[in-house]
Structures are given as C-alpha cells and as structure tokens.
Amino acid sequence: MADVGTTGVVFREPLIFERSRPGREGLRLPEAGVPATTDDRAGPDIPAVWRRTAPPRLPEVSEADVVRHFVRLSQWNFCVDSAMYPLGSCTMKYNPKVNEWAARLPGFARLHPRTPEHLAQGALELMWDLERRLCGICGFTRMTLQPSAGAQGELTGMLMVRAYHVDRGNPRKKVLIPDTAHGTNPASCALAGYSTVPVPSGPDGLVDPAAVAKLMDEDVAAIMVTNPNTLGLFETHIAEVAEIVHGKDGLLYGDGANLNALLGIARPGDFGVDVMQLNLHKTFSTPHGGGGPGSGPVGVGAKLEPYLPVPMVERNADGTFRLAADRPKSIGRMRSFYGNFGVLVRAYAYLLGHGPEDVRRIAELAILNANYLLARLRGTFHVAQDRHCMHECVLSDRDLHKETGISTMDVAKGLLDRGFHPPTVYFPLVVKGALMIEPTETESPETLDEFVAALEDIVAQAKTAPDELHHAPHHTRIGRADETRAARTPVLRYRFHE
Ligand SMILES: *Cc1c(COP(=O)(O)O)cnc(C)c1O
C-alpha cells in the first residue's frame, strides 16, 4: 500500500478570541477623510433598537495570528484537495482549478448585481449559453439558474408542479416518493404543501411500476424519482413509471443530484422526466460542503415552461441579452438577483473545458470506477444489490458486524486514520449499515487500489484488534466525537467569561 497515512504535524489551535490581546492590531487604517457619522445623525435611518450601544467585541490580533489561525484550522479539515472523498450521492469530485481562475476574473467576480443590462452583456450571455448547454445535456426546453442549492431547486420544481395543477383547476394533495429517496425530497414536498406517500422498492431495489400504478390517482400531483437511485442502480422501469403517472395527468419530478452517471449517455427529458434540478456544485465541479455556495438549476419540458421563475435571460433579435420578467404564470422569484453567479461561471468553464465527447467520458469513467470498486470489494463486504452499478455502489456491514462486532461507523472512522474521507454511511435507509461509495471519475486506478487496501486493512484489524477500531480515529485532530451531542447541543458561539 502506498504511503497515504495521516502522520505529520497537526497544530493545536485555540479560538481566535483566546489569542486576543488588548490593543494588538493587524491593520492600521488611515484617518477618515470625511466627517464621522454619529449614531445621532444616523438616527432617522437606523431605528434605536437596531443601533449598537457598545462597539462589537472582536478579537484583537495581528495579521500573522489571523493567517496562522485559519491555515491551522484548514489543516484539520479533510478536503477533496488533500485526498479521495468518496461521499455517495454527493459527488465530491476534484474541482479543476481553472474553474476558480474563471470565476475570479474581475469582469465576473466584481460585477455588481445591479449593473445595468447593457453593461452586463457578457454575464447574461454566459447564463444564456449555460442554460442551453445544460438543457442539451438533459433534454429539457428551458432551465432556471436561480436556485442556490439542490434542495431549493426541488422546492422550485415542486412549486411549478403545484402551479401547473392549480392552473388546470385541480391543485391535488399528494406526491409519491420511493423509499430510497434523499431526505430533502419529502421535505421539499411538505414545503410546497403536499403530503408524501412512500413507494416501496421492489426486491431488485428499483421502483416497481405495479406499486406506482396502485398508488397513482387523480389526487397525486407528481412522483419524485432519483435516477440512478441512491442504491446506485438505474431505474430501468422509469419510462413505464412515467407513462403510468402521465396517464393520470401527474408529473414526473427527477432528482438530478446523480446526473454524474448520465452525462452524455441518457437524457432525463427523453425518459419522461418533466422537471428536474441539477446540482452544479456536485456534477459540474464547484467546491462544496460545509454550507458553501451551491447552485440548483431546474430544467423543464414544454408543459412546465410557463411557470418558470422570473427573471429569465432572453436573447433579443439584435443578438444582445436581457432579463425578462414577462411570464404571467410564473411562480415568481426564488431568490435575490440571479442565483450564485460564481457557481454558474465554474460550471460553464467546466463544460467548455470538456466539450461534448469528454462530458460523456465523465459519466463513463465515474461508472467504471464505481464498478471497479464493487468488483474489488464484494469479497470483503456484503453487497446490498450485487449487480452492475452506476456511479456509486452500496456495501453493508452485515457480515462484518455479525463476525466481529465492527459497525459501519467504526469502518468510517478507521478510514480517516488511513487518509481517506469515509463514504456516506447509514444511507440509503433501506440497507442496514450502509456504506455508499462514490469514487467519481477523478480518482486514478492507483488511488482506488489504495482505498481498497485501506478497507481490507480495516477488516483485518476488525478481526485482530476490534477495540482499537471501536475507538478510531487515533491520528486526526479530534478523536471519536459524540455525534448525538454534536447534533443536539452544538456550541456555535463564543461566550466571554468575565
Ligand atoms: C445532495 C442531494 C440533494 C440536495 O442537494 P443540496 O444542494 O445539498 O441541497 C438532493 N437529492 C440528492 C439525491 C442529493 O444527493
């Protein structure tokens, strides 16, 4: 096994408030050249309740203190720039740095959102062209680039579904959701005012058209399907499911977070999907996680076009571009301005950098890598659905746990000690002790072999030294955390002890 462990200096680092010393400063600003505005003068504009009575208590530190503080903290983090991050369903692929260069070009990065249209033509053209390229990949007629994340895209899509049915005089009440769905799916339906009805998967891990037919009636607004589903399996009955749902004038919502498996190979619009969100930060390579900016464009076929959020970017007869809000049936605006524009620039750079042939290679290599891992690991772990997978494969701790008492959580923590981010664990819920692994196309065969060797090493340790594994990780800055306490009573704010 190559040397990919986790030894090295990891600095302890206090809170920045604890580094503070009275009077220490990192930057001296010149005297202001204009008269100071006192609270009194600001009075008419800022109501008294919102005015500070004392200056904020900020840490007093030097520039070196600040730089070292944040660099040290960043070194505690696991990131896709330091090692493989095979988080199933989240597509943590390596993000080419040229995208960052493009997003930082001053003409894009410093463009004010209120810049008049005639001075923002380049940005509008980028959005117009990106929309068309993404529509081409997905088989849709139009797409809104507004939503800031996959989940907000889902809500946008479901609001369009609602607008469609209201327009036809029957708002409907229910949405069907397979039991393998991502948790955001039922949440988005609830926010859009629908109750959800779970659809049990068949024994093959796929949506069973007969089960859909049984549940489908005139009160079902839509079915929400992730394809490939969260077991990493292509929903082979999707066209039949679409027919059943469309037969009762329902709509097919596709959760497009797993588009990495389809790029250039299959178009959701062609297999019956009426509306779908993309996760640009996953499939189209924007650094994400930790709440960073995302983008969840929503594509539609002709049926839902009238309900798209406004504004949309349109091209004038003379080839210039404008933001148009003339869409009387629109669901309105989903967020301020036009979305997370920097993410759109990255996605555009990524697409231009690849070209149509290479876009297909992304999906082909992602699928190849997942199947390679599945083939190498099926002797070591129980496999939930042991057949050809798409971009991710799902293993389970079933046999290992029975034999050694080692759980999925122990395996995940053991991986951290061996220099890999753990895969998604305990999801999908239909698989006991699931390990959902998505290697992505950006990992080399050598890295995949190292990952397999790490998992084999963990299984060996489970048999010889299970206690050590129960207490892993040992080489990270923070050891085994109490996840319940971290989730239930997080401490997110510094309190001064006077
Ligand atoms: C990530 C993901 C989402 C939600 O996307 P966010 O951008 O995190 O809001 C929805 N569905 C699936 C299947 C996902 O993997």
Image (cartoon, rainbow, N blue to C red):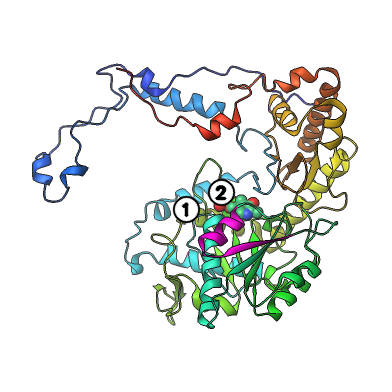
- What amino acid type is highlighted by mark number 1? Gly
Measured as percent of width and height from the top left, residue 43 is found at: 11, 46
Visible in this render: residue 241? Answer: yes
- What amino acid type is highlighted by mark number 2? Thr
Q: Nearer the viewer, residue 259 or 190?
A: 190
Residue 203, by quadrant, is: bottom right
Residue annotated with mark 1: 342
User: Does the numbered disc 2 mark a residue whose Cβ is under 8 Å from ligand 1?
Assistant: no
Residue at (71, 80) in percent of width and height: 247
From the image, which quarter does the C terminus lie in? Answer: top left
Q: CA distance from mark 1 to mark 2?
A: 9 Å
From the image, which quarter does the N terminus lie in? Answer: top right
Q: Which residues are magenta?
A: 184-199
Pointer 1 and pointer 2: residues touching (CB < 8 Å)?
Answer: yes
Residue annotated with mark 2: 286
Residue at (62, 38) in percent of width and height: 80
Measured as percent of width and height from the top left, residue 451 is found at: 77, 34
Q: How many marks?
A: 2
Q: Secondary structure at mark 1?
A: helix
Q: Nearer the viewer, residue 293 or 187?
A: 187
Residue 36, by quadrant, is: top left
